[in-house]
Image (tube, rainbow, N blue to C red):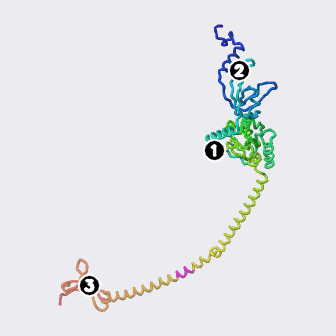
Amino acid sequence: MSTDAAPGQSADNPFPVRGVAIRVAGWIDKLGAVWVEGQIAQLTLRPNSNTAFITLRDPAADMSLSLTCPRDLVVNAPVRMSDGTQVIVYGKPSFYTGRGTFSLRVTEIRAVGIGELLARIERLRRLLDAEGLFDPRLKRPIPFLPDTIGLITGRASAAEHDITAVASSRWPAVRFAVRNTVVQGPNAVPQIVEALRALDADPEVDVIVLARGGGSVEDLLPFSDETLCREIARCTTPVVSAIGHEPDNPICDLVADLRAATPTDAAKRIVPDTAAEQALITDLRRRSARALRNWVNREAHVVAQLRSRPVLARPLSAIDARADEIRRARSAARRDITRFITGESDRVGHLSARLMTLGPAATLARGYAVVQAVPASGDPHVVQSVADAPPGTRLRVRVGDGAVLATSEGEQ
């Protein structure tokens, strides 16, 4: 094996521990001073020591940094430093070669004031609103009667007692899946997010309640954390926010599917009241029965009115009245037809008499005759002059009671 490899690049030429530690310290020492923001997770002031040791935690992630600073910087700070205080520190990264540990040597500490906290919350509120996380159309409906309620709250807290007691009194069959977490301080957000994911993944949980009592702006700060708000928006199970009291309004209230003014209000809005629902059912049954009776009475009155009308009370009276009209019309028609026939018969008789008077038969009856020449071939024709009957012409003479044949002897 070659021994020409650079130090630390082969098993034959390794770095000693001090070599690595010195090199790491050199690399870190090249970093400039930085401003860092976080929450104090642990503050240690050792007796007879001029150095304070601080663990600074990221409230949105399970990450932390070790800080060292002069004791007077903590003791003489304008705001009392304690676990959970939001601070901004200025320091230079360093690597302690004796123990192989990394820390940030702090020369300035500033506590984040209420005004700045509120301004940051407002900026986050506008950002999430612009992304549509507050859109009412995204709100999931709360089930009418949840079988299991997921509850995230502090251990043995008043909020847990209020919700479980009120919900059980309203609907004794309701069940709870309780996840006790820290509800303030640097560890709150990771624990709440973990519990929220576990309850959302549980198929038996119908709704999740995030609850805690009232508190200061710093106490309620975890519930305005961006990580927690986005996790609530990603949940498939409806989430109810019951944080603090009525004036408190953390951002998670706007992201949640339902905001309750207090934990007690959350229990009332999620679980229906057995007595109230039973009273409502009884009232609805009474009102429906009364409405049905009124409808039946109204319809019976309408039927009675219809039956009392003449057309239904005496249905044949209209037919009888029409029958009399038909009989009268038939009599009048028969009378008119008879009169018309009689008149026409008389007129025909008069015309017939006149026709008989003017006709040739009447003339023949008075002694006249009609003479026709009967040629050997052709049709007979009436003789109108002497010239029409020369001697020898066969003649047919028609008289009133018949006709006789004759022969013309010529003109006389």
Residues rendered magenta in the picture: 324-330
Q: Are marks 1 and 2 in contact (CB under 8 Å)?
A: no
Residue located 72% across and 27% down the image? 65
Distance, label 1 to label 2, CA atoms, is 48 Å
Q: Nearer the viewer, residue 409 or 349?
A: 349
**Circle 1 or circle 3, nearest the eye:** 1
Under circle 3, the secondary element is strand
Distance, label 1 to label 3, CA atoms, is 128 Å
Q: Magenta stretch mostly in which secondary structure?
A: helix
Q: Which residue is mark 3?
A: 396
Q: Residue lying furthest bottom in this view?
A: 366
Total residue callouts: 3
User: Mark 1 vs mark 2: which is more N-terminal?
Assistant: 2
Under circle 1, the secondary element is loop
Identity, as a three-letter code, of the amino acid under mark 3: Arg
Q: Nearer the viewer, residue 382 or 118?
A: 118
Q: Can you give x and y, in whole percent of width and height, for residue 139 in the image? A: 66, 45
Q: Which residue is mark 1?
A: 135
